[in-house]
Image (cartoon, helix red, strand yellow):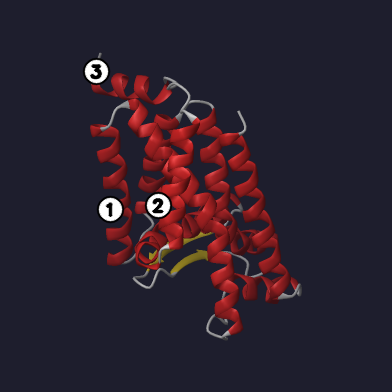
Amino acid sequence: MDVAERIWTRVTTPVPELPTTVLLGALLAAAVVVATPRLWRPARTVVTVAHEGAHGLVALAAGRRLAGIRLHSDTSGLTVSAGPPTGAGMVLTCAAGHLGPALFGLGAAALLTAGHGVGLLWALVGLLALLLVQIRNWYGLWSVLVCGAVLLAVTAWLSAAGQAAFAAVATWFLLLAAPKTVVELQRARRRRSAPHSDADQLARLTRVPALLWVGVFLLVDVGALLLGGWWLLAR
């Protein structure tokens, strides 16, 4: 069996169901990262990767041409796409950013619940590879490469059970981090330090108040957290 076949077998073979204690431990670990400022600041870059990746995926799905993605050291990012400046495609592209991490987390919870924790990690590697070719700055390149290197190290060195446990931490992190970034968004808006936020761009595109868009983001993200948590723990 060649290397590709071995990897495919590992990716597609379900792993035993994780014990509830492991899932709760993963939840605790993710919660500590999200709640601790010194850990949250560097970890927030992972959320930015998911945020900008969601912008890019939806832009392509909406028929727009993706011109590049930049990630910055202050954990902000920018996705540039070419196409009509108004319309459904632009609205969907703008809305995708703050919904993306939560929906990625929800999809991860579904895969993990189905026993595909190893497959989940490889799916994330694949998504990072697609994102990498769109990165247009050095910090963004470094960020994506570090994320990919961590995932590859986990898949290479940990057992299937260990990989599934790591996938559980990553899943909980995305689910917990998504609503926190929306709260941070509104705080920045209140200080008038984010005049070009996704919510404000959506307000200009749709004439729906930005605060209502913030509410939509928070509602979807909290809903994803509750549903994903139920999938993982209510067994």
Q: Earlier in the sequence, mark 1 or mark 3?
A: 3
Q: Earlier in the sequence, mark 2 or mark 1?
A: 2
**In this picture, is 21 found above or below 182?**
above
Instruction: State how far apart marks 2 and 1 are (Cα).
Output: 13 Å
Image quadrant where one finds the N terminus? top left
**Residue 164 figure quarter:** top left
**Residue 197 figure quarter:** bottom right
Query: Which residue in the rendered view is the most extreme toward the right?
Result: 208
Any mark on residue 222, and which?
none
Residue occupying image coordinates x 70% and y 62%: 216
Residue occupying image coordinates x 40% and y 57%: 33
Q: Which percent across, then down, holds residue 26?
A: 43, 42
Provide the secondary structure element on which disc 1 rests. helix
Q: Give the residue pinned by disc 3.
A: 2
Q: Give the residue pinned by disc 2.
A: 131
Provide the secondary structure element on which disc 3 rests. loop
Q: Which percent across, then down, holds residue 128?
A: 38, 48
Residue occupying image coordinates x 58% and y 68%: 183
Q: Amino acid at mark 1?
A: Val
**In this picture, is 92 found above or below 149?**
below
Image quadrant where one finds the C terminus? top right
In contact (CB < 8 Å): disc 1 and disc 3: no
Q: Residues within 10 Å of mark 2 (few under 14, many from 20)?
A: many
Instruction: State how far apart marks 3 and 2 are (Cα).
Output: 27 Å
